[in-house]
Image: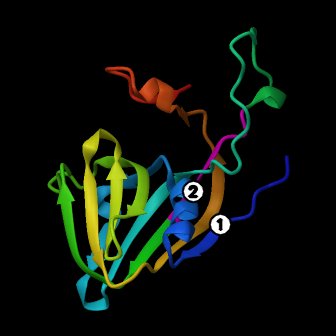
Amino acid sequence: MAEAQPIRLMAKDAEDLAVVASCLQDALVPLSEMRFLKGEKRFVMLVNRFRWEQAGDALKPEQKGDASFADAAPDQRINSGLCIDGVTAVRSRDIDRAKPAKFLSLMTIGLDGPNRLNLLFSGGGAIQLEIESPSVFLQDFGEAWPTQWRPDHAVDRRAGDRGLVK
């Protein structure tokens, strides 16, 4: 499989934002890496993004025995930066900002009318940004690294599960 190139995207409307959202699904976000830069009207966050565009097929249940290096899943994560310009206000729900070391799992981002952008996290947390107009930038940086943990939303729906498959 060819090495995927780092992503560099800009979104100015709902259609563009859907592409960015699909790239960010299941990104891990440390609370300490989110900032509202009020004077710049900018909201930024650093994320640990699962590379869905690079993800291979999951190992089939009928596969048995020891895995070889050739059988290793090509799943990867990469550090990425998200920048949202034109932000005039930020609100959050069900996010404990007193725990900056906590990681959130980003499920999606999307517009709620022309001037609201919602970031929705697993477990019900949300951040709502009041924006002048959609202006979103996503860029990967650094080297990707392999991961054995693939997000699995079918598992995530079962009570008590963490939503990860090893």
Q: Main secondary structure of the magenta part?
A: strand
Q: Residue furthest front?
A: 113
Q: In front of the other: label 2 or label 1?
A: 2
Q: State whether residue 84 is above or below residue 95.
A: below
Q: Pointer 2: residues within 10 angstroms few (<14), some, or many (20+)?
A: some
Magenta run includes residue 154: no
Indicate left or right for 53 with 99 as reference.
Answer: right
> Circle 2 sits on which residue?
23
Instruction: Find out whether the residues at labels 2 and 1 contact each other: C-beta distance under 8 Å.
Output: yes
Which secondary structure, mark 1?
Answer: loop
> Which residue is disc 1 drawn over?
7
Give the x, y percent position of residue 130.
26, 75
Q: Secondary structure at mark 2?
A: helix
Boundaries of the magenta span: 73-80
Residue type at the position of mark 2:
Cys
**106 w.r.t. 137: above or below:** above
State which quadrant residue 126 falls in.
bottom left
Q: Position of residue 131 (x, y in %)?
A: 31, 79
Question: Who is closer to the viewer here, 7 or 30?
Answer: 7
- At label 1, the amino acid type is Ile
80 to 64, vertically: above or below: below
